[in-house]
Amino acid sequence: MWVKDKQLMTYAQRKQQLRWQACAFLLCLLLPLSVLFYFGFAQLKQNQLSAYQEQARNLISQIDRQMFKRRLLTSSLPVEAFDYYQAVYNPLTEETLQIPSVLSHRDPARPTATRPIQGLVGYFQFDAQGQFNSPIWPEPLSAKDLTTSTTEQQQSSVELQQRYEQTKFIYQTLLKSHALQTKLATGLSKENGLYQLWFDVPGYFIFYRLPKVGAQRKLQGYLVRRAPYLLSLVSEYLGQSQFDQPIVLTLKADSSASSNKVHNTMTAQPEQVHFLLSRSQASAQQLAEADIAPELGAQSLYSAPLRWPFNNYTLHFTTHTLPMSQTMVYSSVFALLLIVTILGACYGFYRLSVRQLALAEQRMNFVSSVSHELKTPLTAIRMYAEMLRTGTVVCADAQQDYYGFIHSESERLSRLIDNILLLTRLNQDDHNDLSQVKPDYAPLSMLADIIRSKTSTLLENQGFTLNMVIEPPLSPALEVLVDQDAFAQVVINIVENTIKFFAAEGITDPARKQLDITFRRAEQSRDKLELEIRDYGPGVSQQQCDKLFELFYRGGSELTRTTQGTGIGLALVAQLMKAQQGQISAHQMSPGLALRLTLQTQHVTDTMPKPTGLK
């Protein structure tokens, strides 16, 4: 039942069904393809993010190793170096000399054990009684020395004055450390030999150790500024990283570290430190939080806490939204090309199917038209022949009229059948080696005679006037490449088509009952002839002009059309023109329609002084 209903559908219904089927097919292709591309791009983006995260993870691992390495190197400093004077035995003189310590210099950039300590303020030492001294000042300091004025000896030397001021600054800063005060108050017990860290003084790190010097234990260490120290720590490895876009690294103090008792007793929250790494810069750059662009925090890459003694700090890596990698760009181009190809292919198949539906509809109309064209004259021929056979018509004049009608209708049927057979042969043989179409050069005057002889009777019977003009510089002696029979068939079909539609529109204006035939040189080439056949009938739209030469095309509906025809006349004309190496085109006129035939010529004579009009 479904198939039966489908066969009964009209052309519009079939076309609508085809449109829905094409859309459904396209949707079935694009939906899984879109899902595949979506997850594919998501995986590529995740792979890119994983690569950045792996770089960040390696960077943190390198920073951790560098921190631990620095602790080992600074632990190699001798315990005696934290006094201003260091005893050195001279075996030659058997005397012990007092020389300044290797740590007595004031330049932080000067290396001590292996390399400079960036941000170094100075070294310090406390004994078990809490007495403070520094390797850069020969005498110990107490709390009351911070409020007293300098001595005359100190004022006598700029160098001594600077050393004294630096020592006082170290001492004052250390006194702000609650952890250090607690350690001095509770006693200096034995701990790990490596340097430990206090960070409860805002902006500073206090590295310390508790070695045993002689019979007592002392607290030794060094004070560094936090920002320069961290910057030097991360800059070395940030510059070696392979990030393709700017990266912001933030060292953030984690107040949730409950195991860090020193951190929990701090009165001031350690500030965050931000570093910017860009491929356009040779090293990392420290930034204030206000100077960081908001978009640099759009994509979080990786976060991890540092190891002891910096385990209260967490490193956060952020950057812009990750750009498309080359693989993603190539995949996007491939996906776009694939989608465009699928859309183009689907549209091409849809247009092809629509043309096939239209062709099937035109063939159905052709069958209907041919049936009508054959049935009507055959019915009349049969009726008149029956009347003549039975002797019903006894008048000799009436009999001659009936014989003439039968003859004319028979000729019309013969032309219709010949057109159909000729069109079939032209389509099958593709115009190669056709025995029925053999173009040869003929004079232009012969073409004019063919037009006059083949169309005069048709035009006179309908009251039409023929106007024929040869425009200069053409000459009647010009030779044109045509097949005379095929050319005559072309002209007859065009004239019959003109008369048929003129009568169907009921035009009664005698001034419009004329046909203009003009020979002129083709504009696009001097070696071609243009023959224009122009009528003053109802004409067609420009859209119909483009379809006039399509096979089976007829304007309007088969159910409401009043004109006779099968829709193959002008299609046959186009095929015959092509077989003669010519072309035909339709042009809308006001009023009427102009058909322009372009033919090959052998030579052009430029001796015509004025146009020649032929009636």
Image (cartoon, rainbow, N blue to C red):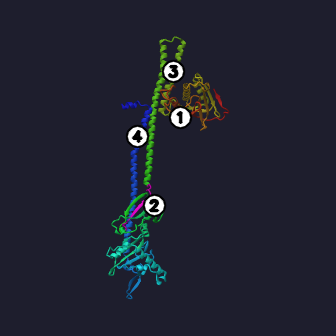
Of the residues under marks 2 and 4, which one precedes in the sequence? 4
**Disc 2 to disc 4: CB gap under 8 Å:** no
Above or below for 309 versus 537: below
Q: Secondary structure at mark 1?
A: helix
Above or below for 564 versus 324: above
Between label 1 and label 3, give the one nearer the viewer.
Answer: 1
Of the residues under marks 1 and 4, which one precedes in the sequence? 4
- Alpha carbon of mark 1 to alpha carbon of mark 3: how far? 34 Å
Q: Magenta stretch: residue 319 in it? A: yes
The residue that label 1 is drawn on is 543
The quarter of the picture where the C terminus appears is top right
Residue type of the residue flagged with mark 3: Glu
**Residue placed most toward the observer, 294 or 242:** 294
The residue that label 4 is drawn on is 24
Badge 1 density bin: few <14, some 14–19, many ≥20, Cα 10 Å: few
Badge 3 density bin: few <14, some 14–19, many ≥20, Cα 10 Å: some
Between label 3 and label 2, give the one nearer the viewer.
Answer: 2
The residue that label 2 is drawn on is 246
- Alpha carbon of mark 3 to alpha carbon of mark 2: how far? 91 Å
**Residue placed most toward the observer, 431 or 350:** 350
- In the rendered image, residue 490, in percent from the top left (x then y), is placed at 55, 29
The residue that label 3 is drawn on is 409
- Alpha carbon of mark 4 to alpha carbon of mark 3: how far? 52 Å
Q: In the image, 613: left or right of 362? A: right
Q: Secondary structure at mark 3?
A: helix
Of the residues under marks 1 and 3, which one precedes in the sequence? 3
Q: Secondary structure at mark 2?
A: loop
Q: Residue at x 40, y 49 (%)?
A: 38
